[in-house]
Image (spheres, grey):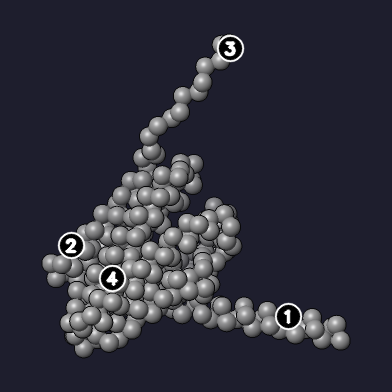
């Protein structure tokens, strides 16, 4: 026998990062409630707020060294609600509801795409290249879908007239989430190090542009990011093909 006593296993969860995750989950749920009540502008804003909170919880966890398997799983569940289920319901109630089966099938493609995207991401943690996402990230996908709703409400577009466009966009974004298209993740940005002064000016310019017309600017940025994936992937494939051709020519 020894005098050593077994170490007690600490139980519980880290409060701070999970508070941000809970707030993001609440924002997504509130977006659903607002859409059911017909307040689609507020619903879209709630999803964008959830995106900000979702971006903070992971950074707070890393800064305070409070990462945990529980937090990772909780974050995925919150993402599924806020960036999978909520955007699909919002776009469905806004524009797809009158299109019958095609409308809810397009919304389901988006939900399924978000779920599969999150599951694949969780299985590739520590393996995939952190500089790139494989498939469109669910927050960015949600930004495209609810961004359309927000712009439509802002400029008083007739949602019924946008039915086919909304259907095609929702289904396409759902497919992009589970595709092999690569998207720049921005995870290699160093927020602690020194940067040139003009970077600060760019940040100020971004805030100014957003303040001019938040719905249009945020929707436009989300669409450009969604389009950037196919462009990046095509450029990488073209460069790889040229490298292979160059290697074959050097052998000859």
- Looking at marks 3 and 2 on the same chain, the residue that comes earlier in the sequence is marked by 3
Q: Position of residue 132 (x, y in %)?
A: 55, 66
**Looking at the image, is mark 2 or mark 4 nearer the viewer?**
4
Report how far apart the C-alphas of labels 2 and 1 lie in the structure. 53 Å
Q: Secondary structure at mark 4?
A: helix
Residue drawn at x 68%, y 79% is 240
Report how far apart the C-alphas of labels 1 and 3 lie in the structure. 64 Å
- Which quadrant of the rendered structure holds the C terminus? bottom right
Question: Who is closer to the viewer here, 252 or 158?
Answer: 252
Residue that mark 3 sits on = 2
- Looking at marks 2 and 4 on the same chain, the residue that comes earlier in the sequence is marked by 2
| 10 Å crowding of disc 1: few (<14), some (14-19), many (20+) | few
- Looking at marks 3 and 4 on the same chain, the residue that comes earlier in the sequence is marked by 3
- Residue 143 in sight from this viewpoint: no
Report how far apart the C-alphas of labels 3 and 2 lie in the structure. 60 Å
In the rendered structure, the answer to whether residue 101 lies left or right of residue 110 reads left
Q: Secondary structure at mark 2?
A: helix
Q: Position of residue 43 (x, y in %)?
A: 22, 66
Numbered tag placed on residue 243 in the rendering? 1
Report how far apart the C-alphas of labels 3 and 4 lie in the structure. 60 Å
Residue that mark 4 sits on = 88
Do residues under tags 1 and 3 come within 8 Å of each other at their CB atoms? no
Residue that mark 2 sits on = 33
**Looking at the image, is mark 1 or mark 3 nearer the viewer?**
3
């Amino acid at each position: 026998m020894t005098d050593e006593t077994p170490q007690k296993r600490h139980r519980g969860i880290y409060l701070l990062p999970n508070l941000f995750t809970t707030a993001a989950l609440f924002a997504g749920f509130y977006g659903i409630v607002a859409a059911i009540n017909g307040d689609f502008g507020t619903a879209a804003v709630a999803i964008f707020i959830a995106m900000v909170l979702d971006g903070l919880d992971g950074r707070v966890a890393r800064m305070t060294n409070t990462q945990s398997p529980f937090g990772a799983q909780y974050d995925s569940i919150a993402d599924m609600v806020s960036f999978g289920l909520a955007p699909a319901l919002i776009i469905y109630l806004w524009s797809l509801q009158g299109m019958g089966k095609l409308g809810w099938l397009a919304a389901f493609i988006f939900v399924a795409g978000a779920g599969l995207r999150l599951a694949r991401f969780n299985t590739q943690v520590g393996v995939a290249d952190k500089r790139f996402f494989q498939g469109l990230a669910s927050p960015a996908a949600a930004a495209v879908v609810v961004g359309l709703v927000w712009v439509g409400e802002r400029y008083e577009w007739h949602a019924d007239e946008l039915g086919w466009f909304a259907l095609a966009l929702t289904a396409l974004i759902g497919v992009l989430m589970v595709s092999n298209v690569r998207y720049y993740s921005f995870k290699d940005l160093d927020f602690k190090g020194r940067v040139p002064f003009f970077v600060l000016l760019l940040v100020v310019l971004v805030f100014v542009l957003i303040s001019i017309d938040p719905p249009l600017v945020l929707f436009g940025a989300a669409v450009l990011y969604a389009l950037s994936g196919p462009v990046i992937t095509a450029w990488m494939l073209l460069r790889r093909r040229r490298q292979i051709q160059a290697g074959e020519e050097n052998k000859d």
